[in-house]
């Protein structure tokens, strides 16, 4: 009982200045809506990371490591992702906030880390937006190679920008139904692949585990066991990038109705998403197509012809699927571009609320949408027009590849915030029974996941040092790390910030304690 009394005192200690400032912001700039229904949030958490990275990008990993390596790699990184998302969900359900990831770092770690995490997350999605817009034009070239890519870039650009101006209730429903479509496409593709490996395709060839036995683990860059390890590590790096986007639920939580009940329920969808959509997906892929397939080895394009699933299905004698998957890819890309602007605008809103960005990003329209954030967040999408010129397309590809490390750093920041949050919970004597959602084996699981995330972050550019030094690979693999270090150090030196101590952390007043007081 004493612990609960202490918690009540802590909750009462929220400063009047902070509350008055929050009210002032709402009056002057407006506030975000909290109209995302539980079923919408559940679907968004399912479909947030389902994109071209899975249906196309998994092919490059299969070629480098083989079916056994890619399966183990996805199992490994999927376990890390579970810890990251469950850690984020616990923080969001216990102490909800609409400040994005930067808010958790500011509150539990150090404003310098919050500043870096917020801008890191914004830059990732601002640049990825241009990649998705380009991919949309390249996919349509499958049918209309005579039309300039820039035309299709403009069509999608204008469409997703207008959708993001809708009230979040309608935006969420649109994204939810797009998620339903994406899930149906994946289920169809997986069933077809199962039929193929069991001998039900037009070629009537039963595959079984043939490719697992013949080429289960492949050497990459060098021979022998070292090469096989590098092949597995290449699959780990690719799988990390394929999983990116799952953490966007942390942004969605800021506009969720009744977060204490909705977040724990939607978080459990992570197990289904990782287990079925990814791990089972690459398992089926490894059964269906050989990593030595010449079409797979030579696939470097962005349309459906580069998808390992399409290559596997067309190689079995099925003729009509490539066109269907290519059309489905358009939906995948539209959904991704849609959420890119959404995340950018909400992240800028969170940064402004934490004084790490101009206050103009706090301005919301009548639909409670951060209008200025949507405009500025979509500006880097103009880089997509570089894909209309082949000479600059090469430079553009290097630039977009640099964003990959920004994604894995998001996982690092979430785990750092959680570990400090957990220390504060224990220091202030808050009972675990009062926390709406808590993963098993915490905080030990978070420490273990953090260790592996750090390893992956520093060795994601392994191929820059093999055989000979490749400076371009080195720059694209590590520029994100250097940028984040500079942001943290620069902010800390300029504002002279200090690390937050567990005893100094103030938790917002929670509904359970309000009822007890009454």
Image (cartoon, rainbow, N blue to C red):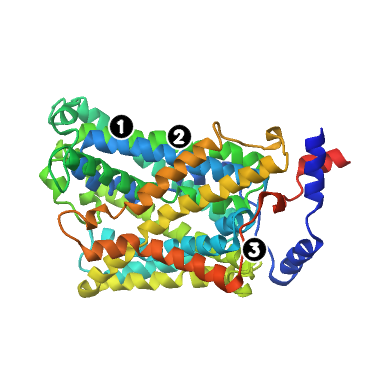
Q: Rounded to the nearest whole Å, what is the CA distance between mark 2 and mark 1? A: 17 Å
Q: Earlier in the sequence, mark 3 or mark 1?
A: 1
Mark 3 near mark 1, Cβ–Cβ under 8 Å? no
The reply to whether residue 137 is visible in this rendering is no
Outermost left residue:
294
**Could you say which is closer to the camera, residue 17 or residue 307?**
17
Q: Which residue is mark 3?
A: 368
**Could you say which is closer to the camera, residue 71 or residue 486?**
486
Q: Which mark is residue 272?
A: 2
Dot 3 falls on a residue whose secondary structure is loop
| Up/down of 422 relative to 407, above or below | above
Q: Mark 3 packing: few (<14 Cα in 10 Å), some, or many (20+)?
A: some
Q: Position of residue 111 (x, y in %)?
A: 60, 62
Q: Nearer the viewer, mark 2 or mark 1?
A: 2
Q: Rounded to the nearest whole Å, what is the CA distance between mark 3 and mark 1? A: 42 Å
**Could you say which is closer to the camera, residue 518 or residue 284?**
518
Q: Position of residue 59 (x, y in %)?
A: 23, 45
Residue at the image point whose x is 79% and y is 37% from the top: 4
Q: Mark 2 packing: few (<14 Cα in 10 Å), some, or many (20+)?
A: few
Q: Mark 1 packing: few (<14 Cα in 10 Å), some, or many (20+)?
A: few
Q: Quadrant of residue 112?
A: bottom right
Q: Quadrant of residue 355?
A: bottom right
Dot 1 falls on a residue whose secondary structure is helix
Q: Which residue is mark 1?
A: 191
């Amino acid at each position: 009982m004493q612990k609960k009394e202490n918690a009540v005192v802590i909750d009462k200690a929220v400063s009047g200045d902070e509350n008055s400032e929050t009210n002032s912001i709402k009056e002057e700039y407006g506030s975000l809506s909290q109209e995302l229904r539980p079923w919408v949030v559940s679907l968004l958490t399912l479909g947030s990371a389902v994109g071209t990275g899975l249906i196309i990008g998994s092919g490059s990993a299969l070629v480098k490591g083989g079916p056994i390596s890619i399966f183990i790699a996805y199992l490994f990184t999927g376990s890390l992702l579970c810890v990251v998302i469950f850690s984020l969900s616990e923080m969001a359900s216990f102490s909800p906030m609409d400040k994005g990831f930067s808010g958790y770092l500011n509150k539990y770690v150090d404003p310098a880390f919050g500043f870096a995490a917020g801008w890191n997350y914004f830059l990732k999605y601002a640049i990825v937006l241009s990649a998705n817009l380009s991919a949309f034009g390249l996919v349509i070239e499958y049918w209309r190679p005579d039309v300039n890519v820039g035309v299709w870039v403009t069509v999608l650009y204008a469409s997703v920008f207008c959708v993001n101006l809708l009230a979040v209730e309608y935006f969420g429903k649109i994204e939810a139904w797009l998620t339903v479509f994406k899930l149906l496409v994946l289920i169809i593709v997986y069933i077809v692949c199962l039929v193929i490996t069991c001998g039900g395709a037009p070629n009537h060839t039963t595959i079984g585990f043939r490719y697992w036995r013949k080429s289960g683990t492949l050497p990459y860059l060098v021979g022998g066991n070292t090469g096989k390890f590098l092949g597995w590590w290449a699959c780990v790096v690719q799988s990390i990038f394929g999983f990116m986007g799952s953490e966007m639920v942390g942004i969605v939580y800021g506009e969720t109705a009744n977060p204490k009940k909705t977040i724990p329920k939607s978080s459990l969808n992570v197990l289904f998403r990782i287990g079925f959509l990814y791990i089972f997906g690459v398992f089926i892929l490894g059964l269906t197509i050989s990593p030595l397939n010449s079409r797979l080895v030579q696939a470097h394009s962005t349309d459906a012809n580069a998808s390992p699933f399409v290559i596997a299905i067309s190689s079995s004698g099925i003729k009509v699927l490539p066109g269907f998957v290519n059309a489905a890819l358009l939906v995948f890309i539209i959904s991704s571009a849609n959420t890119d602007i959404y995340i950018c605008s909400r992240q800028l809103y969170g940064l402004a609320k934490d004084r790490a960005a101009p206050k103009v990003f706090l301005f919301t329209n009548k639909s409670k949408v951060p209008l200025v954030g949507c405009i500025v967040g979509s500006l880097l999408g103009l880089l997509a027009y570089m894909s209309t010129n082949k000479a600059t397309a090469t430079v553009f590809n290097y630039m977009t590849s640099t964003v990959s490390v920004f994604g894995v750093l998001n996982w690092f920041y979430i785990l750092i915030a959680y570990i400090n949050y957990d220390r504060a919970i224990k220091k202030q004597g808050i009972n675990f029974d009062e926390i709406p959602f808590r993963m098993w084996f915490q905080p030990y699981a978070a420490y273990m996941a953090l260790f592996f995330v750090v390893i992956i972050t520093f060795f994601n550019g392994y191929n820059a040092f093999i055989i000979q030094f490749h400076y371009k690979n080195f720059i694209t693999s590590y520029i994100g790390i250097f940028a984040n270090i500079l942001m943290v150090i620069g902010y800390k030196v300029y504002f002279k910030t200090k690390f937050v101590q567990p005893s100094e952390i103030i938790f917002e007043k929670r509904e359970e304690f309000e009822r007890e007081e009454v």
